[in-house]
Amino acid sequence: MTATDATVPSPPQDFIRTIVTEDLASGKHTSVVTRFPPEPNGHLHIGHAKSICLNFGVATEFGGVCHLRFDDTNPLKEREEFMEAIEEDIRWLGFEFNDKLFHASDCFEQLYAYAEQLITEGKAYVCSLTAEQIREYRGTLKEPGRASPYRDRGVEENLDLFRRMRAGEFEDGAHVLRAKIDMASPNINMRDPTIYRIRRVPHQRTGDAWSVYPMYDYAHCVSDSIEGITHSLCTLEFEDHRPLYDWILDELRVDCHPRQIEFARLNLAYHVMSKRKLLELVEEGRVDGWDDPRMPTLAGMRRRGFPPEAVRAFCDRAGVTKRDQVMEPGLLEHSVRDALNPIAPRVMGVLRPLKVVIDNYPEGQVEELEAPYHPDDAERLGSRRVPFARELFIERDDFMEDPPRKFFRLAPGREVRLRWAYLVTCDSVEKDADGNVTVVHCTYDPATRGGSAPDGRKVKGTMHWVAAEPSLPAEVRLYESLFTKSNPAEGPDDYHAYLNPESKTILTGCRVEPSLADATPGHRCQFERQGYFCVDPDSEAGALVFNRTVPLRDSWAKIAKQAGGPAGDAEASKRK
């Protein structure tokens, strides 16, 4: 596709799109090729979602293509299941890579040949220092490094050793291949970085064919060049690696030299975003797997019921900047509510049931009341029939014997509206031996079917409910933040110390209306007055399980205020 065919945003929306626009206008590039290059050593999280949206988004906006390339250069940590999960996550977000699926391992032979080229030209050498010695020789940010005693090995010796490394003659750690750059460079990444190491383990795609594997910094830039990438978009931690990216491609004199551009990564408060830490949480059993709804992984968000358009909208709100971002979870949940509000059917579910008996309602009678699935869009979403009977369940919190002045729900002598049904008045209660209310007795006004009184009398309280017998049993899982600290990885303390013991609450004995009998995993709905919920994969016929996706109101402002963090206070102020 040529630049004239490309759809160029006008005006550019951020500094990256500005650069791409200028490159096309100047003729530097006639098309745009980006890539998303994940390591298949874990599941993707919300930070990766921003990179996915940016790389695929820029390519789409400019009429180009975006590659998915797995950086599968460390077989010790990589698994096929992670590759499959990453592909699923990208498609779930709404992006397609079609035939543009690549692996760094596709280029192992070419990467190796380029490494021999660097050796032949005196730009790389085999070093036999141990890993600890290499770190010691590298120096510090304030002191220059020292040259390895193996730095001046001859070309023939280096080639011989490197080929024997490939042949599997040496044990792990016996030798590495290092680029010969500048041990006195102020940029520590340029102090003769390692570009190949011995790994005598099978690779998930190439089997036992290789005993040496390229390092990320080397494989990344060369793979970009081989694939014809025009703009290599990376997060800010790679800014100091850019001189090495350029040095390798310059020394190899490749035809395609992509431009690396860095942007701020996206961090989510009250979460850890390191894949290493997320893997620890999974392996230690602190969470119920990579798709635990408390995790910041895309698999966890999908299981929790987040729609992909909400995640994309959140990434758009975060924007593309050069400053590190820590986004409040409340902003993500706001995007979720925005996405679900127009599409989620409204139903009734009672999470902590309290029995109600309508004493003047005929025993054994069940009538069906018409209730729209959405009060503002009944024509599109339709309606369902809600059974009403003598015995009902309401929320335990919706009844108080001695209520405060502004309590507008059910209490002795008080009349309330049952949603879509009738006006009822509390007459008496039954209690157990400990004085706890177990049953509330009411009377109903038959003339108020639908919830309105013909005589025009007003009631202040409207409550959701379900009929006791036709309703369905359900388990409901409520989630809070996985950590109690906004940045649990900050400071000297172990991040485990901030794990929230109340991050998951399981409610059994819940009741939901029978319209949900055929709901399958992934079905999203709003339980009126409760929040948005999603059917969990653990559900079975007759044993529904729901995850609360988000509450109806933002609870994070209160959490942030309690935490006392300045970022949280700022977000709370914005919401006010």
Image: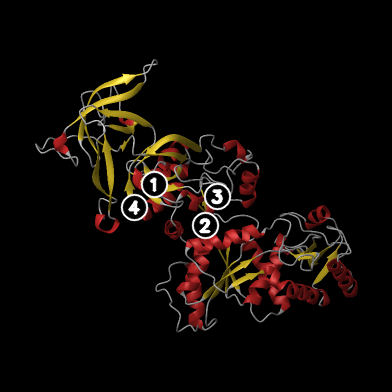
Three-letter residue code for mark 2: Arg
| For marks 3 and 4 on the same chain, the one whose residue lies earlier in the sequence | 3
Cα separation, mark 1 vs mark 3, equals: 25 Å
Question: Where residue 538 appears, x then y in whole percent?
Answer: 51, 46
| For marks 3 and 2 on the same chain, the one whose residue lies earlier in the sequence | 3
Q: Are the residues flagged by discs 4 and 1 in contact, CB closer than 8 Å?
A: no
Question: Where residue 385 appears, x then y in whole percent?
Answer: 27, 47
Callout 3 crowding tier (Cα within 10 Å): few <14, some 14–19, many ≥20:
some
Which residue position holds label 3? Answer: 291
Say which residue appears at 71% left-offset and 66% top-offset. Answer: 205
Of circles 3 and 2, the one toward us is 3
Cα separation, mark 4 vs mark 2, equals: 32 Å
Looking at the image, residue 141 lies above or below residue 423: below
Which residue position holds label 4? Answer: 341
Callout 1 crowding tier (Cα within 10 Å): few <14, some 14–19, many ≥20:
some
Three-letter residue code for mark 3: Asp
| For marks 1 and 3 on the same chain, the one whose residue lies earlier in the sequence | 3
Can residue 236 be spotted in the picture? no
Of circles 1 and 2, the one toward us is 1
Q: What is the secondary structure assignment of the residue under circle 1?
A: loop
Q: Are the residues flagged by discs 1 and 3 in contact, CB closer than 8 Å?
A: no
Q: What is the secondary structure assignment of the residue under circle 4?
A: loop
Q: What is the secondary structure assignment of the residue under circle 3?
A: loop
State the count of labels.
4
Residue 552, quarter of the rendered image: top left
Say which residue appears at 62% left-offset and 52% top-offset. Answer: 275
Q: What is the secondary structure assignment of the residue under circle 2?
A: loop
Between residues 199 and 322, which one lies in front from this camera angle? 199
Q: Looking at the rendered structure, which numbered label has been put on residue 517?
A: 1
